[in-house]
Image: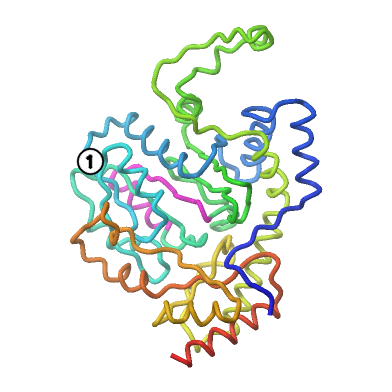
Amino acid sequence: MKNIQVLKPKFRVDECLSEIKECLDLGWTGMGYKTIEFENQWKTYTGLNNAHFLNSASAGLHLAVKILKEKHGWQDGDEIITTPLTFISTNHSIVYENLKPCFADIDDSLNLNPQSVIKKINKKTKAIIFVGIGGNTKNLTEIISIASENNLAIILDAAHMSGSHINSRHVGFDVDVSVFSFQAVKNLPTADSGMICFNSENDDIKARELSWLGINKDTFSRSAMSTYKWDYNVNQVGYKYHGNSIMAALGIVGLKYLEEDNQYRRDLANRYKKNLKGKVDFIEHDSDQTSRHIFQVVVDYREELIDYLSTHNIFPGVHYRQNTDYGLFNTKSKLPKSKYFSSRILSLPLHLELSFEDIDKVSKTLLQGINSQ
């Protein structure tokens, strides 16, 4: 049996090389040119008003928190309600700005539980970060309503959600800002990059300045650029967070195939569901319009099962360990659902080079492993 990895990106190599060659022929591989083209295509695809291409989704999450903090006058020590079950970048972004993560529990979808969120709201609460694990949109609409009713900002960590829709509308609407990841194994893969989409045009402008070291790029003139006599102003400390044209070139190609690729992911996930239903629990998505970035089962004896699968050249993953287990976020909050799933969820291989026969083999081996424990 061939090696089956958890996630494997699919690049249309010839098309990608053609897009990259344009950058090399022009001699412009950095910010601009392809990054602008990709931003415009992303706005057309998603229907979102603004989009700024960055070097990572982690950078985008930091900018999201920073810009909203400054805009609304949040103070150090104010709180953002967030999920404990996510990649660490989500909650690092809160700490970067001297704010406090307030962890609410999840439900069986692995997304934030709306009732737990409501219980965590207090006078220091300023925002909610919602993470759509695996692209799942479950509870997002309700969390948006809770944020609106309590005058809270809402940040959508959409790292897994490229191509996730709610009622045929791409996610990212009705939130203050959404952040998408195009990291190497995401549904729309580059080497590493991301997109930040603010609802407000002024916030988008602010993000563009902050992502280029605080430089006000609008003061560049064509004559100055041609003679390398840069004419700009710097009003604030910024960061080197902007994307480049090589990564954007990969994104432009990937975006052409995103709907097709996501449908195939859903087909593979449905095959898993057919094989495993009634035999092992798995994480359901709330619709057939999600990106299906990952397929997760819920098992006891997870570490032993990982070892068993590995001996059969099947290499699953874990998305994710609850952040409250880390020393940085040590908390006494009782989060029973997060604790339960954190030690039991297992992501099975799900990538575009798998066949239905591969899914059948993984399913059979998984069930054999469970029965052997």
Could you say which is closer to the camera, residue 271 or residue 3? 3
Q: Which residues are magenta?
A: 140-160
Quarter of the figure with residue 295: bottom right
Rendered position, 359 above or below 103: below
Could you say which is closer to the camera, residue 129 or residue 338? 338
Tag 1 secondary structure: loop
Q: Where in the figure is residue 353, as x and y percent of width and height?
A: 71, 67
Please say whether residue 237 is visible from this viewpoint.
yes
Q: Which residue is mark 1?
A: 78
Q: Where in the figure is residue 201, as x and y percent of width and height?
A: 50, 29
Q: Where in the figure is residue 35, as x and y percent of width and height?
A: 64, 33
Q: Where in the figure is residue 322, as x and y percent of width and height?
A: 34, 62
Number of marks present in the image shown: 1
Rendered position, 238 above or below 81: above
Image quadrant containing the C terminus = bottom left
| Residue shown at 26% from the left, 66% from the top | 335
| Residue shown at 35% from the left, 42% from the top | 153
Quarter of the figure with residue 365: bottom right
User: Is residue 144 covered in magenta?
Assistant: yes
The color scheme shown is rainbow
Could you say which is closer to the camera, residue 158 or residue 323? 323
Left or right relative to 310: residue 67: left
Q: Residue furthest front?
A: 311
Q: Amino acid at mark 1?
A: Asp
Left or right relative to 323: residue 228: right
Could you say which is closer to the camera, residue 150 or residue 350? 350
Mark 1 crowd level (few <14, some 14–19, many ≥20, 10 Å Cα)? some
Q: Residue furthest bottom?
A: 371
Rendered position, 250 above or below 130: above
Please say whether residue 284 is visible from this viewpoint.
no
Image quadrant containing the N terminus = bottom right
| Residue shown at 64% from the left, 40% from the top | 247
